[in-house]
Image (cartoon, rainbow, N blue to C red):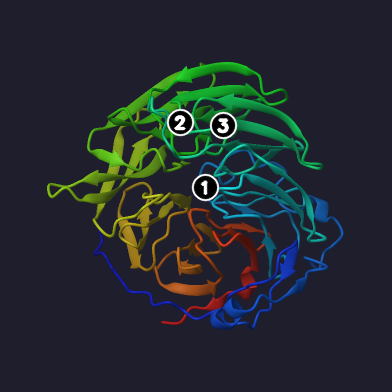
Amino acid sequence: MTLLRIMKYSILSGTLLLAACGGAEEAPPEDTADEASEEATGEVAEETSEEAEGMETFGAEAWTQYRFNPEKNAVIDSGHDPLKNMKFKTEDEVRATPVVADGKLFIGNHSSGHILAFDLESGDRIWEETAPNWIHSETIYHEGTVYVGYGNRHFQDNGIRGTGESGVMALDAEEGEILWEFETEGEVMPTPAIHGEHLYITTGDRHLYKLTLDEGELEHQHELGSTISMSSPNIHEDTLYVGGSSPMPYTFYAYDLEQDEVKWETEFDEVVMGLDDVPPAVSGNTVVTTALVENEDGETEHEIYAMDIESGDILWEDNWGTGELVQNNKSGAPMIYEGAVYVASPKTQTYYAYDLESGEQLWAYEDAAAKAPPVAKNGIVYFSNVEGRVVGMDVETGEPVKEKVLGGTLAPAGPIIVNDTLLVGSQDSYVYVVPLSDFADAKE
């Protein structure tokens, strides 16, 4: 391992974008965080891009799993100009990653269960609907239909995770009409995933469900035997990867989608929490996840694992040590970019980079707690943290090079980049939209 280089990153001054409620609102670029927190300002953005024509194709043509692709580096280029600096007002906390497809922004609200769609050309809210429970899942998109899971983290007396109504629903992307719903016994907080003509969901009732896309009919269900809390399934080629928890031991699964059976499972006897919360990242022959283990003093420590996708054998691992107690979303989620793994630990409050093949730690940088996967483009990896800041790190040196102060708690929703525009959801109820050109140079 290379020598760990820990550097302290002070809170940086920047621009906090605040505005009144409604649709998209253009953020005044010169407001400071203190000034903007006192009074909501801003005007409705009449146009979100210099290239208004053809905005109906802005974003992805399809968004079929958590953070768009197996690597979890959600970067999309549909050939459009960047959007303007603005933000979208929603009904409640945003803890899901925003999804941008076919000229629309789709997002769900945490406690209220609202599901909203915004038009990126006009900035208008197109429609809204309400799920029967929390929305933690991304609102994935496929051929004019939005799919989203719902449920909460509370436990029933029988040990099933999720109280009240739980399940998944499909909505028409243009009108917001509910097309079908499929109810489950336990929560569907993980983002569903699409493979072929089927939708796959992992749940708090310890099952994997296979549903038809058009009608939501159950074609197959498999009892995994582990509770899946927020570990959104990752589909790579014909295999689904997901981490689970109770009953002990914590177990990581590879599920063959062609044979409808478990391909392999790896048990982690030392893990005490977190494996079931982390959406894994996959690239090449490697799947990466994180979890918390317990040391001899009874303290939890954060660990990263890389496994072989064919066998489940652990290729390499590293321990980051202990840190402050984290109430929710205790394990950071990894992202893979150009042969390296980038991940933040909310426990050690540090950003890390690893060589994917060897497991060599490339750099580490101490900052605020971050829980979501970062996003990377053009040699810069962007981390969003609980202090409302987005920090751009040089992927080679691990030095901060870009910064932007937004608002609220940017967790556990992670940033995405669409046409050189960064979008991220916040627990202050806004989805922030910032062209990469608006990021300031980082100050030491």
Q: Nearer the viewer, mark 2 or mark 3?
A: 3
Q: What element carries label 3?
A: loop
Residue lying at the far right in this picture: please name it. 53
Q: Bin the neighbour count of mark 3 within 10 Å (Cα to Cα): few under 14, some 14-19, many 20 and up.
A: some
Do the residues bearing badges 1 and 2 touch, measured as CB atoms within 8 Å?
no
Tell me the quarter of the image containing the C terminus: bottom left
Disc number for residue 72: 1
Q: Is residue 405 above or below residue 433?
A: below
In the picture, residue 200 is in which quadrant?
top right
Q: What residue type is labelled 3?
A: Glu
Q: Is residue 93 above or below residue 207?
A: below
Q: In 3D space, how far apart are the residues under numbered discs 2 and 3 (Cα atoms)? A: 12 Å
> At which x and y percent is residue 21?
71, 65
For marks 1 and 3 on the same chain, the one whose residue lies earlier in the sequence: 1
Give the residue pinned by disc 3.
Answer: 165
Give the residue pinned by disc 2.
Answer: 204
Q: In 3D space, how far apart are the residues under numbered discs 1 and 3 (Cα atoms)? A: 29 Å
Q: Is mark 1 on a helix, strand or loop?
A: loop
In the picture, residue 416 is in which quadrant?
bottom right
- Left/right placement of residue 291 relative to residue 263 reads left
Q: In 3D space, how far apart are the residues under numbered discs 1 and 2 (Cα atoms)? A: 23 Å
* Residue at the (30%, 54%) spot, across then down: 360
> At which x and y percent is residue 196?
64, 26
> At which x and y percent is residue 285?
42, 37
Q: What residue type is labelled 2?
A: Gly
